[in-house]
Image (tube, rainbow, N blue to C red):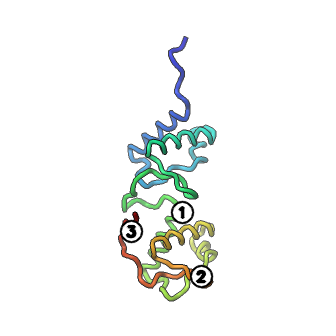
Amino acid sequence: MTQGKAQPTYVTMADDLRRRITTGEYPPGGMIPSEAALMAEFGVARGTVRQALAELQREGLVVSQMGRGRRVHGEAAPDVQPSTRYEDVANQLRAAIKAGEFASDVRLPGEPVLAARFGTARITVRKALELLQQEGLIVVIPSKGRFVAAKPPPSDRNSEG
């Protein structure tokens, strides 16, 4: 007779992901790999991945963001590179705006133009623009388009509450 049953696969997987979080391999504010990537890495079904991630969410280690994926709970360090393509596009647009490439009185290029510029999908550009709009860096004027805000917000973006 055996002493006991081995622990379920999702528990083993959650343990491994927890270790990666606590060692900093997945830093605070950083993205957790997609369900598809975790399925391939661990050789398990989507349900197993979801159970492991749900366990980490219950523990408060992982936060799920609708339409954006899962992140490690906590604030990202200032020197951490963006984890998603749309954050990278937002950073590049932010730099272009601060460099004066886009004036506040001139309409920003449309999503198709920006998508071609950054070699990405329009939805990625849209998410980047939404992020900049939430920061107050750009404004949307209905039926006119998107413009750089007349007075840029303070550079301290940690004022979100």
Is residue 79 rendered to the left or right of residue 57? left
Residue that label 2 marks:
142
Residue under the point 40% across and 53% down: 74
| Residue type highlighted by circle 1 | Arg
| Residue type highlighted by circle 2 | Pro
Residue that label 3 marks:
157
First in residue order: circle 3 vs circle 1: 1
Q: Residue furthest bottom?
A: 105
Residue 20 image-quadrant placement: top left
Q: Secondary structure at mark 1?
A: helix
First in residue order: circle 3 vs circle 2: 2
Q: Foreground mark, 3 or 2?
A: 2
Q: Which mark is residue 35?
A: none
Residue under the point 47% across and 69% down: 91
Q: Which mark is residue 85?
A: 1
Q: Residue furthest top?
A: 1
| Residue type highlighted by circle 3 | Arg
Distance of label 2 from label 1 (alpha carbons): 27 Å
Mark 1 residue crowding within 10 angstroms, few (<14) / some (14–19) / many (20+): some
Q: Foreground mark, 2 or 1?
A: 2
